[in-house]
Amino acid sequence: MAESIWARPEMCVTFRAEIMPGRSREQRTFRIKSVFPNGRVTLHDFLGEHREAAFEPVTFDNGPQG
């Protein structure tokens, strides 16, 4: 059974505000370095493995419409 993919390398993710209180959205945003089969990710310039629940919901933008 295929796992749903919520992230891909080089996309940006933002930690939830309650995980990093007192930091701006910009300070909580990082680029994904790698995605593991279990769904966890590593980030550029931030140590450790992180799961989807640590981040704000991801919205895939299909670009300008019209």
Image: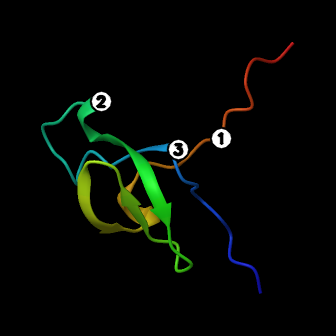
Structural distance between the alpha carbons of marks 2 and 3: 14 Å
The dot on residue 11 is 3
Amino acid tagged 2 = Glu
Q: Circle 1 is placed at which residue position?
A: 60
Q: Outermost residue toward the top?
A: 66
Crowd class of label 2 (few under 14; some 14 to 19; many from 20; radius 10 Å) = few
Q: Outermost residue toward the right?
A: 66
Q: Tell me where residue 29 appears, x and y as whole percent.
A: 34, 39
Q: Outermost residue toward the left?
A: 22
Amino acid tagged 3 = Met
In-image side of 60 versus 7 (left or right): right
Structural distance between the alpha carbons of marks 2 and 1: 18 Å
Q: Quadrant of residue 65?
A: top right
In-image side of 28 versus 8 (left or right): left
Q: Residue at x 51, y 45 (%)?
A: 10
The dot on residue 26 is 2
Would you say the residues marked 2 and 1 are in contact, meaning their CB atoms lie under 8 Å apart?
no
Badge 3 element: loop
Q: Residue at x 17, y 36 (%)?
A: 23
